[in-house]
Amino acid sequence: MQAIHISSAGAMPELEPLRADVRAFFHGTRAHSSATDRAKNWLAGSRSLARELGRRGWIGMSWPKAYGGQERGNHERYVVWEESLAAGAHICSCMPMDRQTGPLLLEYASDRVKRELLPRMARGEISICVGMSEPDAGSDLASVRSAARRTEDGWVLNGRKVWTSMAHEADYMIGLFRSGSGSSRQEGLSQFVIDMRSPGIAVRPIPHMQGESHFNECTFDDVKLPADALIGREGEGWKQVNRELAYERSGPERFLSSFELLRQMVGAADACNPQHATELGHLVGELAALREMSLGISAMLARGESPALAAAIVKDRGTSFEQKVTEAAHQLFDIDLSDPHSELAAAAAFTTQAAPQFSIRGGAREILRGIIAKGVGL
């Protein structure tokens, strides 16, 4: 057992040249990175990498050319991010923009906002975070209380967002606020494009167990926005967010967060050990099944369908798989976490600490299972 090979689905051999290009690029840039560094993949960001991917045309590949895109297929962008994750690239500065922010703006934003932001996003010049969760409204987004008040020349925001990935380096935020006075739950929610340099915004990084700060708390104190910062029509926020979450919950990042650890496990396995062969075979088989499910959702999105239920299933099963990988690592191998020369130990140490958050970010497991139960009529 030496490696885990990813290739395009059998019906899409035309994607192999792109896959080879992306793989060759990361082989040149990531070949000498540490196992710990690779284990971070999309939990970390790199503005310089975002600019390089933008230069190569690998951000916003499926967007219209008028807005900086390439008008290429949804599966092509999937290949780029799948290979990026497998290589352990730090893509959190650009992948979420490609995944959900770009499609959201293309569908709902004003023409000024689209022309101002999308080409810069595609070039990797700016970074955009997503402000949904709040201290008292984590995965239950219908409980959002941060308020947007309409004025004569725009909007004024007040409130607080938490667990906002990469907000400490973001140029803009897509924020969900309650714009309907006296509204509750799904009614009266709207989304806004927020310049993070605006007066009244404070960003406080939240350190996690690994000693770094990926998440942030953002407070808004009378933050003024122009009128066309509103995305779509007022009160459409709930509909927009549900479409965004279908993008957010179904991609390869939802089952490849533990990929570096799995790769190290396969490399360290004893081919003569039946337990290694059986348990790792099950994990690799489950990974392959999740990938096929995710590719199916990619095809649904390309057809303009809204796969909210299928995306919730992929997210639930994918994060459960990611956490299962860390458990299997400690069951199958005698790992000395203090060994500075062991890449298996390094990947296990980082991923074990990161794993508890896998089933929370992007929608807690309990919320997802509620969506699934309602969707299948239970």
Image (cartoon, helix red, strand yellow):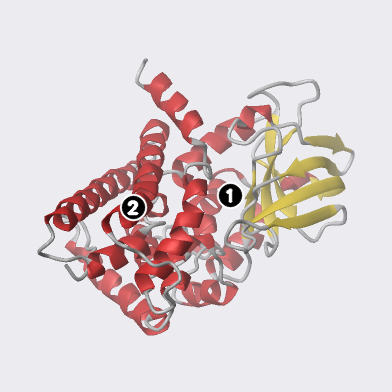
Measured along the vertical axis of the image, is residue 138 above or below residue 248?
A: above
Place of residue 25 in the rendered image (x, y in percent of width and height, measured from the top left): 37, 79
> Looking at the image, which residue is at 48% across and 30% down?
366
**Along the polypeptide, which appears first: circle 1 or circle 2?**
1
Q: CA distance from mark 1 to mark 2?
A: 36 Å
Furthest residue to the top? Answer: 378
Residue 157 lies left or right of residue 317; in this view the side is right
Disc 2 marks which residue?
325
Residue 239 lies left or right of residue 316; in this view the side is right
> Looking at the image, which residue is at 35% across and 20% down?
376
Place of residue 219 in the rendered image (x, y in percent of width and height, measured from the top left): 80, 48
> Looking at the image, which residue is at 45% across and 56% down?
352
Name the element at disc 2. helix
Of labels 1 and 2, the one closer to you = 2
Please identify the quarter of the rendering in which residue 21 is found: bottom left
Residue type highlighted by circle 2: Val
Place of residue 34 in the rendered image (x, y in percent of width and height, measured from the top left): 43, 77
Determine crowd level at label 2: few under 14, some 14-19, many 20+ residues with C-alpha closer than 10 A: many
Determine crowd level at label 1: few under 14, some 14-19, many 20+ residues with C-alpha closer than 10 A: many
Measured along the vertical axis of the image, is residue 21 above or below residue 269?
A: below
Residue type highlighted by circle 1: Leu
Place of residue 256 in the rendered image (x, y in percent of width and height, measured from the top left): 37, 56
Disc 1 marks which residue?
105
Asked whether residue 207 is in view, the answer is: yes
